[in-house]
Image (tube, rainbow, N blue to C red):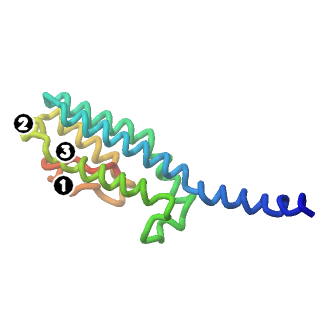
Amino acid sequence: MKKFIPMLLLPVFIAYAECTKKYSDINDALSELIKMQETYINAIESAKSAEDVAKAINDYADSFTTLRPKIESFEGKYPELKESKEPPEELKDSFQKLEQSAMKLTLVSRSISKDHISSPVVQKAIERLVKLSRPSEASGPAIAPGDAEESVPIAPGQ
């Protein structure tokens, strides 16, 4: 009988382990996105020229292009998240970190000097990022026309 009880509890432990790691792929993607934002923030803060700013924006866009399919797959994989007002407990810490990173990214993006923001190479990089940030052609721009002169989007799709 003693051997039988652990056999009954094994499925419970397996199910529990699976439930606690249900969103691990989302946590991994959010960690990657946060690292991308931190890299972008550091690059913008250390930019000395318009070319440096454009490179930072283009590098960020390149990184997001790689991550985007993974992020988009979550909508189909976890439809319950779309209807939820609060992230599941497992994701709360990652979402909080992402929010903090996004706020800093916005501030840093807005701090790009007027000389750099008006440069054609920077404008081209911003246009590329805005184009990538559109979830679909029908949904319109991620930032309103004219906003590109003031800031770069927080993250493509936001």
Type of amino acid under label 2: Asp
Question: Residue tagged by mark 3?
Answer: 108
Q: Which amino acid does label 1 sit on?
A: Pro
Residue denoted by label 1:
145
- Quadrant placement of the C terminus: bottom left
Numbered mark located on residue 27 in the image: none
Q: Residue at x 47, y 70 (%)?
A: 84
Counting residues from the N terminus, which is met first, the one under dot 2 or under dot 1? 2
Residue 115 is situated, as x and y percent measured from the top left of the image, at 6, 36
Q: Which residue lies furthest to the right in this view?
A: 1
Label 3 near label 1: C-beta < 8 Å? no
User: How far apart are labels 2 and 3 at the CA level?
Assistant: 15 Å
Query: As drawn, which residue projects farthest toward the left?
Result: 115
Q: Disc 2 on helix, strand or loop?
A: helix
Q: In which quarter of the image is the N terminus?
A: bottom right
Q: What element carries label 1?
A: loop
Q: Which amino acid does label 3 sit on?
A: Val
Residue ID at (37%, 40%): 35
For mark 2, what is the residue? 115
Q: Nearer the viewer, residue 44 or 61?
A: 44
Relative image position of residue 54 (x, y in whole percent): 22, 33
Q: Which percent across, then down, holds residue 22?
A: 59, 57
Q: Nearest the camera: 144 or 44?
A: 44
